[in-house]
Amino acid sequence: MLTTSTVPFILMSGLLVYGTSNAFPLQPIAWLSCLAVVSFALLCCIVSPLSRILNRPRAVYIVDHVCYQPDDSLKANLEVSEFLSRSVRSFTPPSIEFQRKIFLRSGLGEETYLPPFMFEGPFNVDDGSVHGRTGGGLSEAWKEAAMVMFESVAELLATTGVDPRAIGILITNCSLFSPTPSLASMLVQRFKMKESVKSFHLGGMGCSASVIACAMAYDLLKVNPNEYAMVVSTESITNNWYIGNEKPMLVTNCLFRLGCAAILLTNRISASARSKYELLRSVRTHAAADDKAYMCAFQKEDREGIVAVELSKDLMGVAARALRENIIRLGPSILPIDEQLRFVFSFLCENILHLQIKRYQPDFTKAVSHFAIHAGGRAVIDEIERNLHLNEKLLEPSRATLHRFGNTSASCVWYALAYMETKQRVRKGEKVWMLGLGSGFKCNSLVLKSLADIRLPSKGAWLDSIHRYPACMGSIHRRDH
């Protein structure tokens, strides 16, 4: 195969023939042969680099993203949450007290949001009529999805100035609410997107679904030139509020809150100048082959037939193992060579030479400047802190997200990124590691590179409260001591 490295040898051969012909005059045909060789070599010098440029994988950019901020009337502090719990007649006093304790230890603050149906009193029913119910009904779930998705997408389109009919790829994700028509179809209908739009809905993918959706958009943009892709990530609180009394299922009531994120990606070179980030790579780890990993976050019926997601005690251990596997795959592509060599050396000493040494933990801060980690709960963030050896400054965006908005499921990582942007911490050329963890069990990563210094946005979910962070989290950190 002809490569740029062979071209100089061809050119030298042609020049040698030319030089020889000066010393030993040849027939005209020899001159023509020499000229053909030199011309061919020069052509290769031009065509080969051009071919490399044309066949290079398309860069994928994140133009902008929007995080949904609900109305103040939907705020649910501890007092409101307790009142709503006591209004559910199916809850026993121990269940109400258990939820209170979990809330106090969760890391959630006093300004998270619950969906509208929670304030409309739908649970004032007798025990005998709650069989099979999972919070609000289908119509309430539709209203919640429409409220958060329509407002998020409308704001994203207005911010970026992109026509809805310019969207070529649309991906929605909502793990626990997958109606017919799909949420993607709902957006196509609402915003009158073109008939050729490639639309997908991801259901049951857990809290890492937004990272998965962006990785999917990344792959689709690699093979669909000159396109815009939109990802919309949310979770249905309405349809999955648990009204039974089994503790492993009650935990989700205390952690999950209302939220949504809309992200616009593109491979258009013309859009790179106004894009915030380049999406460099994605790495996905799926540990469902292991029984404990598969069952650690599992939707099921309780003994009364009420459907909810059960979180097992194995969750933290499973998350740690999935994170380590993801790190092993991601590390070689972003870590500097000295960090890789230290890790390999310690691995060989431990597994080949059987020396009693502690395996070296690579320092990812040498490769990444910012971390947008899934704000699944205080225990989740603490586990990631231990495994990645990160300081509190780097974890501040995720802890602040948990405190201000709660666990908004897959959209959490975008609230954490928005926090960094509103603090104006992201500078040109810096890398951001987005880390999503979710049922299955899955650990998924995105690595972004900032294309410019991120300025203070004119709109955003953090603008009305950013001045209070991180100072206001102190009271929450002390509440369980």
Image: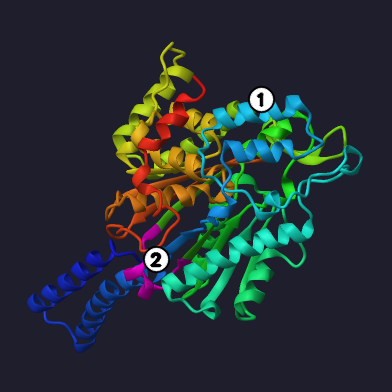
**Residue 38 quadrant:** bottom left
- Three-letter amino acid code at disc 2? Arg
Point 42% across, 21% down: residue: 359
- Label 2: which secondary element: loop
The residue identified by callout 1 is 313
The residue identified by callout 2 is 56
Front-most of residues 324 and 114 = 114
Count up the numbered dots.
2
Q: Which portion, as a residue range, is magenta? A: 265-278
**Residue 333 quadrant:** top left
Indicate left or right for 42 with 232 as reference: left
Task: Bin the neighbour count of mark 2 within 10 Å (Cα to Cα): few under 14, some 14-19, many 20 and up.
Answer: few
Residue 169 x %, y %? 57, 70
* Residue 220 covered by magenta stretch: no
Check the image and report above or below for 248 versus 401.
above
- Three-letter amino acid code at disc 1? Lys
